[in-house]
Amino acid sequence: MSLKVGFLAPEGEVLPYYAARLKALSEVAGIEVVVYVDKAIHPNAIEGLEESPGAVRVVRISHLRVPSHRRAKDLGYTVSVRRGIPCSIAFHCIGDRLDILVVCNATQMLLAKAAAVFGGVSLALIVEDTLHATRLMPSWLKRIKAVAYRMSDSAFAFSEEAKAFLASIGYRREIFRTSWSLDFEAFRRAVTASTNRPSVREAEGVKFLFLGRLVPLKGSWSCWMHGSIVRRHSMAVHP
């Protein structure tokens, strides 16, 4: 009997490299992958997932659009977006008889909790939060996030800073340390007839560009240190 694992796409989207990893996971014996995406998703975002029927089952679900504003007064910017809220995710999880659902934020966790209570679905949480990223979050919102995160059965921390954040909110479940990684098939240098420059795979070194503010707890130091490790072991990295 196969293990059925569902992924609730972040903000209703599946990035190109995310889709490639879902397809690779579905090829593992004994695992059936279901990915839930916004009905309004652009076809390019799930390119490759539906080319081989049965490999990954894509389920389009309705999302409620609500305005969202994020402010960083110390850095002087405000981000305003319209978030997609997957209100019906619990019904889909129970109907699809999932064993595990992977979510990536507090809103998704709160909406999916009913699937755990009434359908026996285990909830796994992807965590990218850091103490730096949540430093200006209102205290009431931090408490809600902490309660939602502690509802999960396990967590995937994408950095040491994310693990520190989980510790700060009293998270006691199992934590798996993992990270994002680059898929060079999705992020490859464009090749045109008008250039003779070598591709990324043919170049002597690979240049990784970090664009951001060098502030404490943001992970910049970890990025720098890991660059030196890559230089020593496999390839030239030019910061």
Image (cartoon, rainbow, N blue to C red):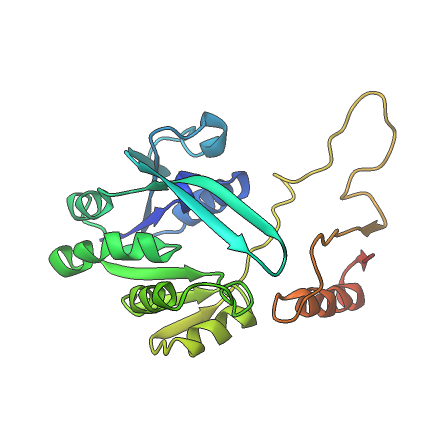
Q: Position of residue 109 (x, y in %)?
A: 30, 57
Image quadrant assignment for residue 84: top left
Residue farthest to the top? 193
Q: Is residue 108 left or right of residue 23?
A: left
Q: Quadrant of the C terminus?
A: bottom right
Image quadrant assignment for residue 68: top left
The image shows residue 86, relative to residue 205, as above or below, that is above
Q: Give me the residue at 33% from left, 30% from top.
A: 39
The image shows residue 164, relative to residue 85, as above or below, that is below
Q: Give me the residue at 88% from left, 29% from top.
A: 196
Q: Give me the residue at 50% from left, 28% from top.
A: 44
Q: Is residue 16 left or right of residue 166?
A: right
The mark tally for this picture is: 0
Q: Position of residue 60 (x, y in %)?
A: 31, 33
Q: Position of residue 162 (x, y in %)?
A: 50, 68
Which is more toward the observer, 113 or 232?
A: 113
Which is more toward the observer, 229 or 208?
A: 208
Q: Is residue 223 left or right of residue 61?
A: right
Which is more toward the observer, 49 or 227?
A: 227
Asked if residue 48 shows in the view, the reply is no
The image shows residue 176, relative to residue 167, as above or below, that is above
The image shows residue 217, relative to residue 188, as above or below, that is below
Q: Position of residue 38 (x, y in %)?
A: 35, 35
